[in-house]
Image: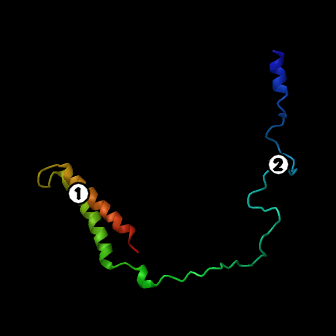
Amino acid sequence: MATRANSKAGTGRSSKAGTGRSSKAGPGTAQKKGRSAGGRTTAPGQKIQSQRYTPPIPKNVKTSSRWLGIVILALFALGVLVVILNYAGLLPGGVNNLWLIGAIGSIFAGLILATRYH
């Protein structure tokens, strides 16, 4: 029993745990976030210029054709329409999972094209 009391007393923890700490520098102490040890690294108002020049992309390279946006929307609409018509039982062959696979394929193709759209 005495060893248990001695081991708890010898842990080095103070009774004021969680209260303010001293500001001594040493191993294991962290600085406040956003502060560097030497102060500012640049003078106030000084802009840092990159050493590389990246030319802007020409406008004709950035823009996609108008038909691509129309095809994307048409594929999305076709996929949603097929899902709705399948569950309503209005497609040939009644309710069939192959119609749903086609609808998911149509929506997926629209998503793939949408990633290429600028």
Q: Amino acid at mark 2?
A: Pro
Crowding at dot 1, Cα within 10 Å, few <14 / some 14-19 / many 20+, comes out as: some
Residue 20 horizontal/vertical position (percent):
83, 45
Residue at far left of view: 92
Horizontal relation, residue 42 to residue 73: left or right: right
Relative height, residue 95 to residue 38 (above, below) = above
Name the residue tied to disc 1. 102
Quadrant of the image containing the C terminus: bottom left
Q: Amino acid at mark 1?
A: Gly
Horizontal relation, residue 67 to residue 10: left or right: left
Relative height, residue 48 to residue 102 (above, below) = below
Q: Are marks 1 and 2 in contact (CB under 8 Å)?
A: no
Asked which secondary structure carries label 1, the reply is helix
Residue 60 horizontal/vertical position (percent):
41, 84
Judge depth for marks 1 and 2 and give the one in front. Answer: 2
Q: Residue at x 68, y 79 (%)?
A: 49
Q: Nearer the viewer, residue 79 or 52?
A: 52
Residue 66 horizontal/vertical position (percent):
32, 79
Q: Earlier in the sequence, mark 1 or mark 2?
A: 2
Name the residue tied to disc 2. 27
Horizontal relation, residue 99 to residue 9: left or right: left
